[in-house]
Amino acid sequence: GAVVSQHPSWVICKSGTSVKIECRSLDFQATTMFWYRQFPKQSLMLMATSNEGSKATYEQGVEKDKFLINHASLTLSTLTVTSAHPEDSSFYICSAREEGGPGPQHFGDGTRLSIL
Amino acid sequence: AQSVAQPEDQVNVAEGNPLTVKCTYSVSGNPYLFWYVQYPNRGLQFLLKYITGDNLVKGSYGFEAEFNKSQTSFHLKKPSALVSDSALYFCAVSAYTGGFKTIFGAGTRLFVKA
């Protein structure tokens, strides 16, 4: 089946540090990838939709300059949390869809980000 | 605008009993419906989908879901629950609005007691 690899799985760093999270589709090409944030005991909050070779589409209220997304190839998207602060601590999950249609999304295992 | 509701925060069921996790949706046009499961500190795993065709959809791990257009529902079911089914379940709906956008429900936590 389609596999999405997300790395790292856990990050602890100091306030002010920038953190990069990678999301790779291992056995399929993903023209579209999605970045979500999940708070404890809550649903997924879509942050942005990442399209290969073009700028990401951010959801309302998500700071573009804070959460930099790059989708440089059909198998890799990255999310960089710039100058992270404790309020950015969260569980970040990426997903990818194999095709442009309404197929299921395939999710990475998430990244637990803790900012001290 | 599309939306999806999971009216129960939590469902408790005894092992061996049938389980149902409810989901209703609202969408313009044809709905594309999905169920995902999330285990602690993990991403979501795809269980099953309804795109078109037979209203009863069978998926992974013995789960199934029934698409009911008149009630705009897509409830997740399993005839006999296992303790290992305990997890967080998300219903999701996609619709075409210039592209396919997926909306997730709030999630329902399933507890299966031995």
Image (tube, helix red, strand yellow):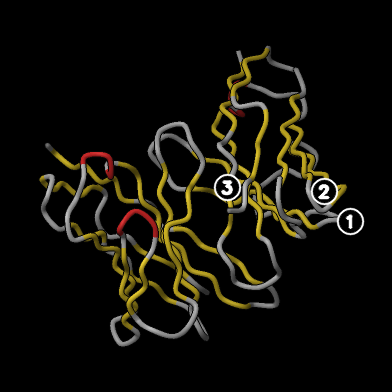
Q: Is residue A48 left or right of residue B56?
A: right
Mark 3 and mark 1 lie on one chain; the one further toward the N terminus is 1
* Residue at 25% across, 63% down: B77
Which residue type carries mark 1? Answer: Gly
When the figure is inspected, residue B3 is found, relative to residue B83, above or below; the finding is below
Q: How many marks?
A: 3
Residue A107's disc is 3
Q: Quadrant of the C terminus of chain B?
A: top left
- Residue B4 x, y percent position in the rendering: 41, 66
Discs 3, 2 touching: Cβ within 8 Å: no
List the residue tagged with mark 2.
Answer: A71
Residue A101 sits in which quadrant?
A: bottom right
List the residue tagged with mark 1.
Answer: A53
* Residue at 15% across, 46% down: B12
Of residues B54 and A89, the one drawn nearer to the viewer in this rendering: B54
Discs 1, 2 touching: Cβ within 8 Å: yes
